[in-house]
Each structure stands twice: as C-alpha cells, then as structure tokens.
Image (cartoon, rainbow, N blue to C red):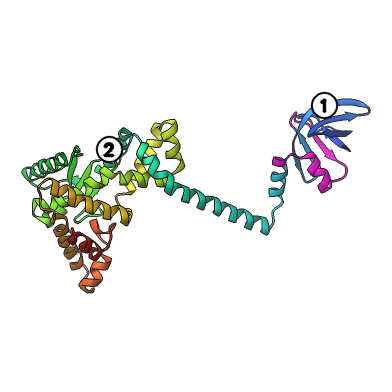
Amino acid sequence: MELFGHFFRPQSSKRDSGKIIVVDGVASITSDGATVCEGAGIQSVQNKRDIYLDNDYLFALAEPLTSEQEKLILGKTERGIAWLENFSLSKALLLSLSLMAILAALRYALTFITPLAVSIFPQEWEKTIGRNSYQALESTVFSKTQLPSTQVERLRIKARQMASANGFESPEIFFHQVSRLGGPNAAAFPGGPIVVTDDLVTLLEKDELVLGVIAHEFAHIQERHSLHYVIEAIGVAVIASVVLGADDVLIEEMSAVAVNLWVSQQSREFEKQSDLLAVEYLEKADLDKAALGLALKKLTEYFCSLSPGQSVQECLEETESGWLSSHPSGAERLEYLSDQ
C-alpha cells in the first residue's frame, strides 16, 4: 500500500513531502525517490491521518484512510485501541456489561478457589497477620483489663486445658476493656490471638459460660474462617502470593483487612459451624456442653434489655449488637444449639 503526504523526522518540526509504503505492517518512507527510512513498525494511527512509527517518525497523510485501508495497516491490538478511541454510547454500554461479566465471573471463581488457597496458605503467615491485627487494635481500641489477675489466669488455664483435650494448642487469649465497640464481645484473629472483653466476663459470671464463647472462637481459628474472609477480600493478589510467595507489603495489607473483621459481619454458615464445633470442644473437655447455649441466652437477654420497645421475639430475630451482631439470629441459634 502506497500513501502520500508529509513526514516529520524524530524530534524535528520540519515537514517534508514524501510517500509511505506499508507491507505486512512494516513501513518505509521515501522522498524524491530516495529512501528516508525502512523496516519500521506501525505504532499507532490517529485521526485516520497521522501514522506513528516505532522509530519515532510521523507520517501525516494528505487524505484520511478509508476503513479498509486502516484495517490493512493496523494489527488486531491497534485496531482495538482505535475502536476504543472512537467513543459512542453503545460502546460504553458494551464495555460496562463486559466488565460486569468479568467481575462476576471472577467473584464466582473465588468462591471455589478461596477454600483451596486457605488450605495451602502457610500457617506462619496467618499467625503473623493475626498478631499484626491485634497489635494495631491494642493501642487504639483495647485498654488494660480491670478483671482480677487470678480470674484471668484461671480462665486461660481452663481454655488451654480445653484446647489440649481437643488435640490442638490454645492461641493466646487476651482480656481487655474496649473503648469502642464495647459491651460483651469476643473475637478471634487469623491464627490467634483471641480477645475477650471485660464486659463479657462480667455479664456471663461463670467460667464455663465464658469458656463456651472461647470454644466458639477456637472453632473459628481451627477452621481458619478469618483467613477465608481475608483471602476473599484481597482475592487474586493473595492467591498469587500463595504460589509465588508473599512479601511484607502484602502481609501488611492482609493484616489491615483482618483488623476490619473485628467489626464486619461474618458468614452465617461459618458461625453455625463454629457454634456446633464449640459444643463438641466443651463435651470432649468434660465441660457442660450447654455452656454456649446458656451464654447465648444471657447475651440475648442483655441486648434485648437495651431495646425496650421491642417484643422478646422481635429482639431474638434481630439482635444487632456486640458479639451477636455478626451471627445468626438469637432464635435460630438457640434452636439448633438446643438440639445438641
């Protein structure tokens, strides 16, 4: 294909008349019968007139390219770019729908890939994420416990004994007053530690009821539920890190996501699984397997007392505060725990 016009040499504003010859995506420029340059690739075509070469030459056509000529000059990628540059509402709609379809496909794929990523994710990385998350909240949200040291140590010993009876090592358990998100609460970070608030211990009073809640948090750690959420939140980056090896930046990013788990809602399926595993843990440790159900009953009554305008049944169905906020409704939990 031979086309006429003017050309500009690299870093020059001087315009010279000439001819561009394009064969199989490779261009040559001649002027007055002499070869100016040859063997240059087509970098892009703009406005159907300006042909940019990869040797920094610019050839400005005297007549705009026809659609057929443009197809012959440009490769598939360049034609795609040129198509995108010509905005239209239909193109914008098509691209939006395509993007939504891709995102939906990725999200759907993650539901299958995430469990695999969790299963092969190094436990040491998970524990590092948990430690980082706890330390980030320790200085901003958690305050020193006001519980008697003897009570704290007694609960820790009993928790370690419960873990041992079930064949795993107890993560660290910290007791704190909580300046924000206060009230009766408990949380397990990825790989540990577990945080229990003073208000929870005070409300439940009996060690076995507190241990029922701790058993629930043990189950989250053993089943790696928090890690599951972290991987889902960061998605492909974390899955790639499992294959290629995580760096410090990614570990820090995952830790930041784990901090948000303290206030985020959890999967009802995971919560039910943790409830039922907690009953097994209590039973194997020769503790009252009804302890978690009794703790739940006390917690439900406490939070319902904060909503005097509701009926008890309405409150049981909605309970949206503290430790119960990220769990199945009180009525649902009391029902399946009573079956145990």
- What residue sits 71% from the left and 48% below the top? 83
> Quick one: SS at disc 2?
helix
Left or right placement of residue 301 versus residue 48 in this view: left
- What residue sits 26% from the left and 43% below the top? 221
The answer to which of 168 and 15 lies nearer the viewer is: 168
- Where are the magenta residues, as a range? 54-78
Badge number at residue 38: 1
* 68 part of magenta stretch: yes
Within-10-Å neighbours for mark 1: few <14, some 14–19, many 20+: some
Say if 132 sits above or below 309 in the image.
above
What type is the residue that disc 1 sits on?
Answer: Glu
Left or right placement of residue 117 versus residue 185 in this view: right
* Residue 190 location (% of width, % of height): 29, 42
The answer to which of 201 and 176 lies nearer the viewer is: 201
- What residue sits 16% from the left and 55% below the top? 292
Within-10-Å neighbours for mark 2: few <14, some 14–19, many 20+: some
The answer to which of 81 and 18 lies nearer the viewer is: 81
Say if 200 sits above or below 155 in the image.
below
The answer to which of 192 and 120 lies nearer the viewer is: 120
* Residue 120 location (% of width, % of height): 37, 36
Most extreme residue toward the left, as rendered? 150
Of callouts 2 and 1, the N-terminal one? 1
Badge number at residue 167: none
* Residue 143 location (% of width, % of height): 19, 46
Left or right placement of residue 51 versus residue 111 in this view: right
Residue 86 can be seen in this image: yes
What type is the residue that disc 2 sits on?
Answer: Arg
How many labels, in total? Answer: 2
Query: Which residue has dot 2 on it?
Result: 131
